[in-house]
Image (cartoon, rainbow, N blue to C red):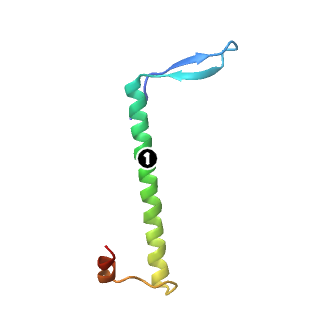
Amino acid sequence: MVLPQTNYVVDSQGQKVFVQLAVQDWENLVKELNRLENLLAFKAKLKDAFREVRQIKRGEIQGVSLSDLIDEL
């Protein structure tokens, strides 16, 4: 992703206080943020699934058969 062109609004001391960018660039940033949030959520779920597999293999929790899983759907 290419960083959008930005303009800064500064206060009387020259400190940056706001950023201005084109609406399309803002919308692209929001889309990318949503994509990354979804990716992180998927990663967390996948990590949980692998943790459950390890627990099932160690006999710590009971696994669910494929037929039971299909019946739940």
- Taking depth in this image into account, of 23 and 58 the one nearest to the observer is 23
70 vs 45: above or below: below
Q: Amino acid at mark 1?
A: Leu
Q: Position of residue 10 (x, y in %)?
A: 62, 16
| Residue 45 visible here | yes
Q: Please state if 10 lies on the left or on the right of 64 as rendered.
A: right
**Quadrant, the N terminus:** top left
Say what secondary structure mark 1 lies in.
Answer: helix
Q: Relative to the observer, which residue lies in front, 35 or 73?
A: 73
Q: For the image shown, how many numbered marks are present on the structure? A: 1
Image coordinates of residue 19 in percent, x first then y, are 53, 23
Which residue is at 40% across, 32% downward? 27
The quadrant the C terminus occupies is bottom left
Q: Residue furthest top?
A: 12
Q: Is residue 2 visible?
A: no
Q: Crowding at label 1, few (<14), some or many (≥20) Cα neighbours within 10 Å?
A: few
> Mark 1 sits on what residue?
36
Q: Who's the residue at 55% across and 19% down the image?
A: 8
Q: Is residue 5 above or below residue 27?
A: above
Q: Position of residue 49 (x, y in %)?
A: 44, 70
Q: Residue at x 48, y 21 (%)?
A: 6
Q: Is 68 situated above or below 2? A: below
The answer to which image quadrant residue 43 occupies is bottom left
Left of 11 or right of it: where is 42? left
Q: Is residue 34 left or right of residue 60?
A: left
Rendered location of residue 13, percent (x, y): 70, 14
Q: Nearer the viewer, residue 67 or 13?
A: 67
Name the residue at the bottom extreme: 59
- Seen in the picture, residue 72 relative to 1 is either above or below; the reply is below
* Identity of the residue drawn at 43% across and 26% down: 4
